[in-house]
Image (cartoon, rainbow, N blue to C red):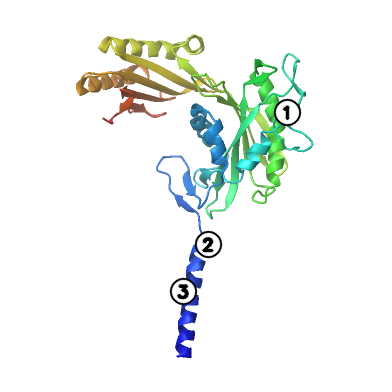
Amino acid sequence: MVKKLCLIFLLLLTACSSESEVTATPTNSVTYSSIENDYAVTYLDDYQNAREWHGKYLSRLDQIEIPKRLQAISKEYFDVNEYSMSIGQVITKDDIIMLQRHESSNYPYALNPELNSFKTKDGEILASPYIVSDIVELDFYDQDQELSGMSLAIVLNNSVSDNDETIILDDETIYNYASIIGRKLELYLRNNEEVSSNMPIVITFYRALESSSYVPGNMIGKGIFEGRSGQFEKVDQKWLLIPSNESEAFDNVTYTNFNLLKSKVNNFLPENVGIIAYAFYNNESLAELDATVSMQAKTYTEIYSLAELIAESAKRDFSSLAYEFKVNIQQDYQTVFTIYKAANSKEIEVRDLS
């Protein structure tokens, strides 16, 4: 009887030990990209809590725009065929809270300027401007699923409050300041045990606009650091609302073509219809044109006919290979049709989502 009990006890220990070994060694999983020329995604077993901060303090527009542009810039440094990408997990919420403080003896790595030290382009010294509001991170893994690179966006406010006054900072002032604190951030990251001394780190500068803006902010700088080498360079990107005076002055061709499309839409269904577009420019060239048509049609046939009208206009007036063209047709605020043309393609896709 004693021998039987001992044998049962040993079998139970072996079973528990085997189960413990399986659950104690979690592994990351990776999925292949379904989008051509884009990253596969590494799914981690656990994500750091920094995502809580982004959800609270990034605007609705910037929550999409920042990681999207950061991912695009990362392709210049991390080959999509050699790396997979994941949500950032090195910088924690506590790191971000510390980094967005004002620099002081207690917080030497803080990225906001020391009190009474920041000077504007006009030479005015601001008491306590809150310039850096967030850090957005993407991580890159090699084929062995080892962390092998990072990309970060320093989110910088273009308007700051100081002594009950709102001050708009110009791009040059923001870029010069970001170039200094960008190097400080890189040094801070090198102290993290997960970041080796020669791991490539891409750091970008994102200019966030005031909360009342109808368009997202934009990247204004970038740089890659490996070991002790690296430097920043300017990035020329921006969004424009169409129609607007600024879009008419900056790109009259796109402005005119959009107004022609708007006129056709209004003539087709003059009541309860509106159309607006957002144009994204990279190095002063149109890269994306996103339009939304809002309507209250009486029948499905009206919606379908309008979609075909816009598709025909896209083939004729927005046929340039240089940029991506997207139109969402919404009925009572729900997207029912999309018209899409990829960059470097002539094919127009009409998708019925009703």
Label drawn at residue 113 = 1
Query: How far from the left and from the top, in percent, is residue 191?
Result: 71, 47
Q: Quadrant of residue 117?
A: top right
Compared to residue 333, the image places residue 16 above or below, namely: below
Q: Is residue 213 visible?
A: yes
Whether residue 258 sits left or right of residue 169 in the image: it is left
Q: Nearer the viewer, residue 57 or 248?
A: 57
Q: What's the distance in space between the residues labelled 2 and 1, CA to CA?
A: 43 Å
Q: Residues within 10 Å of mark 1 (few under 14, many from 20)?
A: many
Q: What's the distance in space between the residues labelled 2 and 3, CA to CA?
A: 16 Å
Label drawn at residue 15 = 3
Looking at the rendered structure, the kind of residue marked 3 is: Ala
Q: Quadrant of the N terminus?
A: bottom left
Q: Quadrant of the C terminus?
A: top left
Looking at the rendered structure, the kind of residue marked 1 is: Pro
Residue at the image point whose x is 46% and y is 46% from the top: 40
Q: Quadrant of residue 177?
A: top right
Q: Residues within 10 Å of mark 2 (few under 14, many from 20)?
A: few
